[in-house]
Amino acid sequence: MRKDIILAGVGGQGILTIATIIAQSALKAGFNVRQPEIHGMSQRGGAVEAHLRLSSEPIFSDLIAHGTADLIIALEPMEALRHLDSLAADGVVIANKKPITNIADYPPVEDIIAEINAIPGSKVIDADGIAASLGNARSMNIVLLGAATPFLGIDSQILKETIVGLFQRKGQDVVDANIKAFEAVAK
Amino acid sequence: MKKILLGDEAFAQGALDAGLSGCYAYPGTPSTEIMEYIQGSALAKERGVHREWSSNEKTAMEEALGVSYAGKRAIVCMKHVGLNVAGDGFVNAAVTGTNGGLIVAVADDPSMHSSQNEQDSRAYAQFAMIPCLEPSSQQEAYDMAAFAFDLSEKHQTPVMMRLTTRLSHSRANIETKDVPAPQNERREPENPRRFILLPAIAKNNVKKLCEKQADFVKLSENSNFNKLVWGNDTSLGIVATGIAYNYVMEAFGGDCPHPVLKISQYPVPKAQLAKLMGACDKIMVVEEGAPFVESQLRTPLEDARILGRLTGALPRTGELNPYIVAKAFKLDVPEPRPIPELVKNRPPRLCDGCPHINTYQALTEALKGYDSAKVFGDIGCYTLGALPPFNAISSCVDMGASITMAKGASDAGIHPAVAVIGDSTFTHSGMTGILDAVWENSKITVMILDNGTTGMTGGQTSIGAGFLERICQGLGVDPDHIKSIVPLPKNHEENVKTIKAELDYPGLSVIVSKRECIQTLKKKK
């Protein structure tokens, strides 16, 4: 088993949280893990990315080579397209629908969605809408993680256990809300 | 134990498990997480490991040397440009030598994700004539800590640990020891006079340091971190250092037909290099950072058959990645898809509600009407004031340079000359500049943006935050020209007036603009 995943979004959206959940789950599932991410200046409202490599074999490079990623998980639609150069010929994109238009020249959202939909197997999901309808708008990233789960090659039960472990110290309500968010798309 | 850790954290855990007594550091991307990990470690707490931030990298370096003098194990951590600040202590610590193990951990930032340059710290280690370790994996970062402490104590030398962004900030699963080694007892140096660098003693020390160099090469040649893996196709030999080795292995799918020399310990292992260069027609040097090894191989007689960053086989600047490296070997790799043209840049920006926004708004308005005004910036979130919509600063060079450049510009006739500097940057390297300006009563206006934290790196302790006015008074700034403002929209008119009045004052004034960082405020909620 080997999965190369790009996580993309805007600083503050919760990319690193889902990167942590997948990485810890992969470790529990017995895979080797490499997960490079960006800290520091570029985190301030700018474009943020993390790579995530899972493999039953040893992994050499922390970074994913261009044109070889199996999956892009994007918390923001335009950020999905920013990393298309990483995506393999048969790779897919799972992207959140809601744009973050904190720049002056943000392109028309319909054009962005059309570009994503043109990639076979890809999905655009209204993760913000689903999270809000569940009464916990902040769990948008977990909704998207749930949507991407069929592509991860990790048992969803393990991912759930990791989510429980991660949010436990914030109380049972937060745990329940995040599990609900995780299961929202699958159901 | 199995753990999943960042490269920075793996090194920190390695140091703790090797009996660390003190960690000293100033925050700087990508090195910050070393100290943060130790601050959060139960073992560090239980053992009373020193884990407070220092004022700057120089004070951190010297404090760590003091721990080493007392016979205990210390690490000092910084980003690459921080080593310039610590440079005096660093180079001279090689001359005094160490007592307890001392590791200087420096995280380089090739491609300058969060930095002003991409200097390569391996050159600093060579300059100071000390061994340098460059891990290629998080596991090596862990293992090297104990190794480096032993090496440091046995050979009485500081050891550099050179990390790079993509290792520092990448997580991996690693194996750690179940039982940490004990800490050293306090133990005076056997020859304490070697720490007194009077010329008579220093001359002897420098001679001894030179004599150690042959030993250091032997250590590299026998190191488990360096390895020569033979391949049958000797038309090309490969030298790959640190994480560049991973990219080479990735490119060849773990099965390289050419001989590969992996280097993770310096000085360079001469015997292995000689064997590789003797057997192969051409040599490709792949390294993350400057062409450091490549330059050493590129003697006049060998120049034509050495390939690397200096020949264009690899890019001269910037970090490597598996695609660039595969291309350099002309391997057949998937071509990247084009990125649609509609994708626009999304540069970093000041957070909504950031106090710096209000400070820049007030400053910009106060400066209206002065044709020749210049604002000299500094290192921190407020450097983002260089970007639209503010376009508010003319320079950003190094920690503290706002004040001293403003003073020099004022000396040369620029008026008003304004410095904009954050609280942590001010106590890092701004205070001495103020002294210069006090001595000459320079006509500059210094704005200290006190948000109570070291914001850019994620909200670490800022030692002088909250009492900067008193520091400035102590440095001799006229109390009548030390002003405080609160950068909020409702205070805008008043703040503009305060700034304007000080711009017109023909002498040194300091305006402290004080409001907490919106990020640290949010975290408290």
Image: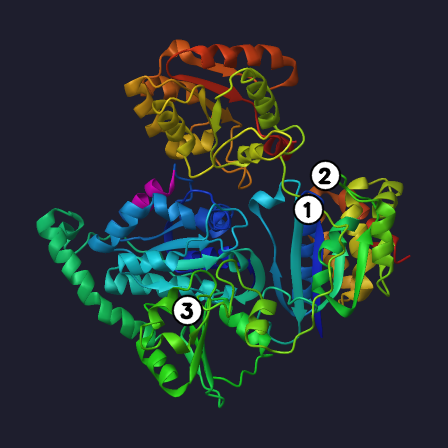
Question: Residue A154's quadrant in the figure?
Answer: bottom right
SS for dot 3? loop
The chain to which mark 3 is attached is B
Quarter containing the C terminus of chain B: top right
- Relative vertical location of residue B516 with respect to residue B20 in this rendering, above or below: above
Labels 3 and 1 touching (C-beta < 8 A): no
- Relative vertical location of residue A44 with respect to residue B119 in this rendering, above or below: above
User: Label 3 crowding class (10 Å Cα cut-off): few <14, some 14-19, many 20+?
Assistant: many
Name the mark on residue B57: none
The chain to which mark 2 is attached is A
Q: Which residue is tagged 2? A: A103
Q: Amino acid at mark 2?
A: Ile
Name the mark on residue B345: 1
Residue A127 drawn at (x, y percent): 84, 48
Q: Which residue reaches farthest right?
A: A187
Which residue is nearer to you in this view: B379 or B408?
A: B408
| Residue B42 is at least partly visible in this image | yes
Between the C-alphas of marks 3 and 2, the distance is: 43 Å
Labels 1 and 2 touching (C-beta < 8 A): yes
Quarter containing the N terminus of chain B: bottom right
User: Label 1 crowding class (10 Å Cα cut-off): few <14, some 14-19, many 20+?
Assistant: some
Residue beneath the point at 68% across and 46% down = B345
Is B442 on the left or on the right of A158, as rendered? Answer: left
Camera-near label (3 vs 1) is 1
Q: Amino acid at mark 3?
A: Ser
The chain to which mark 1 is attached is B
Is residue B60 highlighted in magenta?
yes
The stretch of residues the image draws in magenta is B56-63
User: Label 2 crowding class (10 Å Cα cut-off): few <14, some 14-19, many 20+?
Assistant: few
Which residue is nearer to you in this view: B153 or B108?
A: B108
SS for dot 1? loop
Between the C-alphas of marks 1 and 2, the distance is: 8 Å
